[in-house]
Amino acid sequence: MKIVAFMMNPWFRTGTPSDWIIRYRDDQEFHREILGRSMSGKALQLAFEELYDEIWWDNINWRCNPEPDFGHIDRVIETVEPKLILCFGKPVFDAVTKIDPPIPFWGCHNPNAKHKTQEDLNQFAQMVRDFKHAKNTCDIRTTGNG
């Protein structure tokens, strides 16, 4: 089952080569690797464990701009065709809400949000694993049979 996770815009040091930024946008393996080196990425890897490498990680704006790029969000959803969208942070959830995709989208706090713990993130990740497992089985509760 395909899952897309959106976060806020990335942050790059001044002088970061533009081809590196484009690679971060277009190369999912590279994106995961770079994200995984950040404080947010380390918290996400800890929470999602093996599922971290199965999720399509993206940003609501791939440039260093906090405003949502609705065209980019739409393209990612259209290209990946996920069965679930994860939104990390209220601005991200609000942006996806405006698009109103025809699939479930769930909100969670930013991985580094104040007054939130790793345990909060771990519980969210467990809900995602439970959803993924239910969608990959003939669970009567998810199929509507019965």
Image (tube, rainbow, N blue to C red):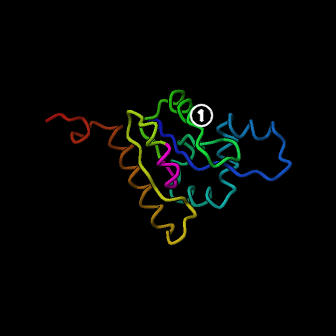
The N terminus appears in which quarter of the rendering? top left
Q: Does residue 19 show up magenta in the picture?
A: no
Q: Picture coordinates of residue 57 (x, y %)?
A: 58, 43
Front one among 66 and 101: 66
Answer left or right for 131 relative to 140. right
71 above or below 66?
above
Q: Picture coordinates of residue 18 (x, y %)?
A: 81, 39
> Hey, which quadrant is residue 28 in on the image?
top right
Answer left or right for 94 relative to 7. left
* Residue at point 51%, 27% (across, down): 78
Q: Secondary structure at mark 1?
A: helix
Front one among 101 and 129: 101
* Residue at point 55%, 36% (across, down): 70
* Residue at point 58%, 43% (across, down): 68
Front one among 15 and 54: 15
> Hey, which quadrant is residue 145 in on the image?
top left
Q: Picture coordinates of residue 13 (x, y %)?
A: 80, 53
Magenta part mainly helix, strand or loop?
helix
Instruction: Find the magenta span and give its range.
Output: 87-95
Q: Does residue 88 show up magenta in the picture?
A: yes
Residue closest to the far bottom: 115
Reading the image, the residue beneath label 1 is 72
Q: Amino acid at mark 1?
A: His
The C terminus appears in which quarter of the rendering? top left
